[in-house]
Amino acid sequence: MPNRTAPVAHRLSIALLAALSLPAFAQQADQVSATQQPDKSSLGTVTVTGSRIKRTDVEAAMPVTIIHRAEIQAQGITSAEQLLQQLNIASNSPDSLAANSGIAPPGTRGNNGVSGANLRGQGADATLVLLNGRRVAAHGLAGQVVDLNSIPFAAIDRVEVLRDGASAIYGTDAIGGVINFITRTDYQGLQLTSGVDVTQEGGGNIYHASMLGGWGNLDKDRWNVWAAVNAKKNDALRGNQRDFANSFQPNRGLSPDTRGTPFATVGTGTGSMIGSGLKDPASGLTKTSINTLNLPGGAGCANGGDMMGPYDANIWASPSASFACAWDYGRARTIQQPVKTLQAIGRATFRIGEHHEFFAEFMASKVTSKRQFEAQQLSTSINASATQLDAYELNANTKATYDSIYNQLLNYFGPQANLVYGKPITYRWRCEACGPRQLETTTKAYRLLLGLTGTLGTWDYNVGLSRAQSKAQSTLAGGYYYTPQLKAMLKNGVLNPFLMPGQTQSAAAEAALAAADATGLELYNGTTAMTTFDASFSGSLGFHLWAKEKVQAAVGVDVRREEYQFDGPAQWALGNAFVFGPPGDSANYMPKKTRNVKAIFAEFNVPVFDSLSLDLAVRHDRYDGFGGTTNPKYSFKWQPVDWLAFRGSYSTGFKVPDFAKLFRGVTESQYTGLDLADPAICPKGQFNPNVVNCSVQIRPNILSGGNPKLAPEKAKQKSIGFVLAPTRNSNLTVDWWEIERTNTIRSGFSLSTMTANYPLYASNFIRDSSGNIIDVDQRYINTGGTLTRGIELDANVGGKLAGGNWNVHLNGNYLQAFRTKSFDDLPYSDNLVGEYDRYFNLPIKWKHTLDFSWRKGNWAHTLTQVYRGGYKDWQPPGIANGYRPPDWDPNVKAYITYNYSASWNAAKNLRLTFGIRNLLNTKPPFTIRYLDDGDGAAWEARVADPRGRAFNALVEYNFM
């Protein structure tokens, strides 16, 4: 039983400190066992994430998860991204290297090689990431998200995750929570670490190595210097390396929605060979997309090229495309990006007198990612402009192929089809001869921090001056071509879009492609930077109320200058007239933008009674261009008995718009789909040539970009919970929380949402003097909000077994509600928990991590179950309209995997760790999800790990 004479808060915090972190593997050799009573001096007072006041009641006072280095190593985790994937508080969002593998449209620039942290579904830009309690620069391109790949993981001592709002402590972005990566403060010796994480089926392998060295004893020498360097390589994983990445499963409701195929599909166009379409003599319906391979009696789509198949018009509710072919570009895509990372960090500490320390810390990283996508889809037009590609014309080079296409169409549709011989053929073609598209992004980041800590009388102080920067550059690395040359080779027929398998492009075509290759061109570059001065002071106010403990306080200032710049070659202003198809972003170039931020804050810990303490924090931030915002936080801890504590908090928060959202230029990009009609007269805006009012196809420009009139987002956070520790070997925490965000910054409303709810979005459809829609406005605005609430629990129980210590740990997250509204005056939507979301967070109702660990002598073992609940699947238009494939299931099943790891202290200075991820080689659950701008189809990257069963090994040797 616990020692009844120890201070109440101290006993409770000791029982929880090692156990509440995610994998509950605190029983490692260099950690205090959860089944052993640690010495009282081992805890002491510490400053924990979420408070400026040093305290002992860390786990009882606030919802903080602490994950120690030994736990991270025992799980075979080698990066911050992998760690986030194990956290149940982390959202199922498109922030990993697998989930953000799609091509980003202009204006977003995507997350080229970026891994973000997203807590409680609030977004990676609303989760604050700290390194040793201070900010680091956001990624140079996106300008709003910290790249976890830049965090120097080899030197991490622990990770603290605050599961609560913290704008009153840290300012903007701390809405979803705070992740604080804390490195060692001093180190002596030399440590070498090397590891591999290889998949059973190939692809997606990970290799890493690190070195940590330190000299000097602070107590004896009064100085310490240490440095660490880490190199890591993530190999690419391609869709064709995993059989679950298969879009041709029409019996289950999944089929590709693309008509750009390696053997081109003929399309409509005024003045083209088929005009506005051909009437099918069998059904009487007009066909607007026709691949001659898929005509009755034709060779069949599968004979047209690798990964081709018939277009399923029933699934996509497009009867006019029933003679088209489709192509599985999800299988052709890289589903996990290749990334190379080099990280370094060093720290020098000098003791001045007995109560002061000066330190200098430098962190740097270089991250290189090479994103690879399927070959370009080329769509052609009659009388093409400089930014468009010309249709297939009849000339000496093309006559044989042209005649073949014409005759096949004539043979089926007959003379009454009004085919016009000699008119150009418009088509969609997947140019495999062009090769896969590739973008290479190199990001260099650093932070230099100078600081002074110590005590003045009875007060502690911490002062720091830092400079942080992230600079990123993206270049074309293959698969892109100068538009004038590409237009010429298509127009004159040198490049042939109607080749059957086994046929190859001519030598002249290959030479023309080589001459037009744009590889090596810079696409864009961006730089974020931040200069910060901060100072905080904490200590006792010298009096107490009815409790024995005195009132504690912390005060401080935070002054910083933020900078952002985005640039690139001026030629990208020509758009597709320069190079065809890359996500250039010249409309959003901006010279260096700066803003100053000044903040003051105060925090008070007030022990009212021995069993009740109150906390009050308040912070005032003033931003150039926005004015000031004041955000308080109120929290309490009530501990009626020594084994039970209740806690709760209420706070407000804010998030300022980043530079890109404020100052991006307006980008116009033509809608490329062929499925849009005027939603004012056509229900849901779904083009259908056989339906009145829906037979006129429109292709307006989509407007995206920044808005300098944006205001900060606002948030309110609530939480209440309890901590129960009835014995030394068992504990339980349960926390209910709610976050409401208003005045949210939104853009790019889903076009399907806008057309389906046209009266709400009518002003976004911009018309000319004749009433025709010419633009759809999807720029950033402040509007609407989100309401999210849930319950988090963490439980541990342990004991002795077979001469060793065992522990069972459960960490779970129940998402109770997720509601949104697009406009302020609208009510919140129905609860979206368990419903499919196409692009953003996937609100899964329940997920947990359950593990069993056992340690005896030099051995430690952990078996972990990772559970991600199922949800309602997305429905393509045909299924939404009532079509039912024979094996269709409206629900996506739960994803359950098991991991095993074992650690062995083989010698005094040698530790070996071996593990198996996805022990049963469980495949991702099937889903109809299909993203032509995302990571493919048939599986969900926001939930599942596409690597499958993987074996990891880690060797750590210490030279003492």
Image: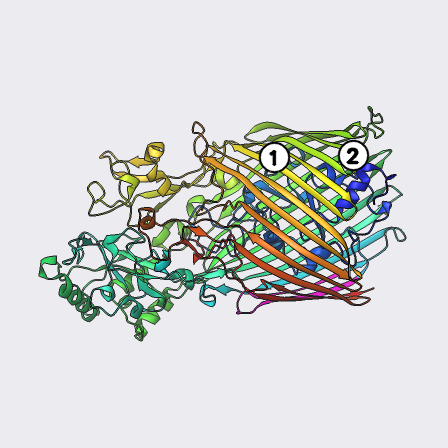
Give the left or right position of residue 108, taking residue 491 as reference. Answer: right
- Residue furthest left in the image: 416
Q: Is residue 199 magenta?
A: yes
Determine crowd level at label 2: few under 14, some 14-19, many 20+ residues with C-alpha closer than 10 A: few
Residue 126 placement (x, y as % from top left): 57, 40
**Residue topped by disc 2:** 641
Mark sitting on residue 596: 1
Residue found at x 59% / y 37%:
175
Residue 627 placement (x, y as % from top left): 57, 27
Determine crowd level at label 1: few under 14, some 14-19, many 20+ residues with C-alpha closer than 10 A: some
Residue 486 placement (x, y as % from top left): 32, 62
Looking at the picture, which amino acid does disc 2 mark? Val
Mark sitting on residue 582: none
Judging depth in this view, the residue of 794 and 820 nearest the camera is 794
Q: Is residue 163 above or below residue 277?
A: above
Magenta stretch in the rendered image: 190-212
Q: What secondary structure is the magenta-colored segment mainly?
A: strand
- Residue furthest top in the image: 545
Residue 388 placement (x, y as % from top left): 29, 54
Judged from the image, the secondary structure of the residue bearing numbered disc 2 is strand
Asked if residue 48 can be seen in this view, the reply is yes
Judging depth in this view, the residue of 509 and 59 nearest the camera is 59
Looking at the picture, which amino acid does disc 1 mark? Asn
Give the left or right position of residue 385, taking residue 356 as reference. Answer: left
Give the left or right position of residue 428, taking residue 272 as reference. Answer: right
Judging depth in this view, the residue of 577 and 616 nearest the camera is 616
Q: Quadrant of the N terminus?
A: top right
